[in-house]
Amino acid sequence: MYQEIDWEDGPKDKDEVTVRTPVNIAVIKYWGKRDEKLNLPLHSSLSVTLSMSDMYTETKARRSRDTVFCINGKIEPPTKRFDRLIKKIRSENPAANVDITTHNTFPTAAGLASSASGYAALACALKLLYPTRGVVSELARLGSGSACRSTAGGFVLWEKGEEEGGGDSVARQLFSAEHWPEIRVLVCVVCREEKAVPSTAGMQSTVVTSNLMQHRVAHVQVRIQQITEAIQQRDFPTFGEITMRDSNEMHAVCLDTYPPIAYLNDTSHQIIRSVHSFNSDKGTVRAAYTFDAGPNAVLLCEERDFVELRERIRGEFCGKKGKVTELVECKIGCGPLVLTD
């Protein structure tokens, strides 16, 4: 049985823990860093945490004499990003070593936020095994910036922060999943292959070469305020339009990078057109798309429009057409869970 982690009263100093962490999908994207080592962003971002019915990372970690890292059934050398997490843990627990087994229930490195849920799971497991000062989202951020948002459920804001050391660059829940339970999410798996340009490399190139990036940094905070108000009022047309515009802008910034970075493919663009057609049928925004750094689409709508949207996508892109290989239906969900006895 799994239960939400209570960081105040939850399990601590255990020899072994198993954690599940959710995927989060940014509706105001994180793209660009002001500090590479600490994963400090150029601007704040905002996400929705998906339910763990189909898409999550599960990580089992136990205290060990040596650190072993096994991902999706294959033993891998520890990454530089993992090293940052364990270094933070060892700053207060010098003898810390862990045997880690982790797997994703969805494509890895395909633009579906696998690094977010993956490093959030590692951070939660490490912090339960070896308690340290600071909040878990700060630890998760050291592994992957967007991972800090997977340490909370519902609608989550990752504050840019101002401190050089990053102590105030943390994620916090703005609204729980229960605030807007009618929201439904349809993940359209277009491609399961690893993306040609990893997010970290893409961000580095964008910050150095894109003129549009400076425009984005200057205006994104206003967009966050606007979408926060839309969520508070449960105003889907405004929420959906802002979500789509922000996704479009992030990918425009990627194309403005030199050499240009194109994460979307023909099917991605066809899905975009289909969503706009769906909205034009009744003259209002009933559905929204958003794309992370990859071709896979995440569609959002309210429950009353979900079946119609799903069947339209299924009819246009699934089956014999084969452009979308899988549809995953999600709700907005809770934050990390820990296995209980």
Image: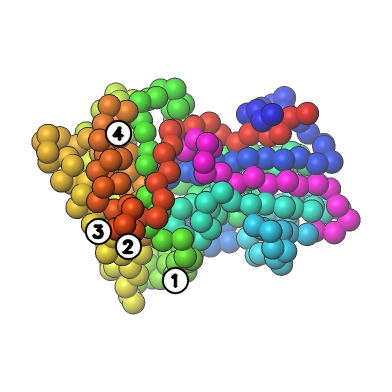
- Which mark is nearer the camera, 1 or 3? 3
Instruction: Provide residue 221's location: percent of width, then percent of height.
Output: 33, 43
Whole-percent x, y for residue 112 in the image? 46, 53
Label 1: state its secondary structure. loop
Task: Tell me the distance, in whole angstroms, between the alpha carbons under discs 3 and 2.
Answer: 7 Å
Judging by the rendered image, the residue that carries numbered circle 2 is 264
In the shown orientation, is residue 286 left or right of residue 114? left
User: Badge 4: few (under 14), some or many (20 or more) residues near its Cα, within 10 Å?
Assistant: few
Q: Label 1 crowding class (10 Å Cα cut-off): few <14, some 14-19, many 20+? A: few
The number of numbered badges drawn on the structure is 4
Q: Which residue type does callout 4 highlight?
A: Val
Look at the numbered discs 1 and 3 and tell me whether their residues touch, using CB distance below 8 Å.
Answer: no
Kindly identify which numbered label has been placed on residue 307.
Answer: 4
According to the picture, the residue beneath numbered tag 1 turns out to be 196
At label 3, the amino acid type is: His
Inspect the image, locate mark 2, and give the three-letter code of the amino acid beneath it. Answer: Leu
Question: Which of label 1 and label 4 is nearer to you?
Answer: 4
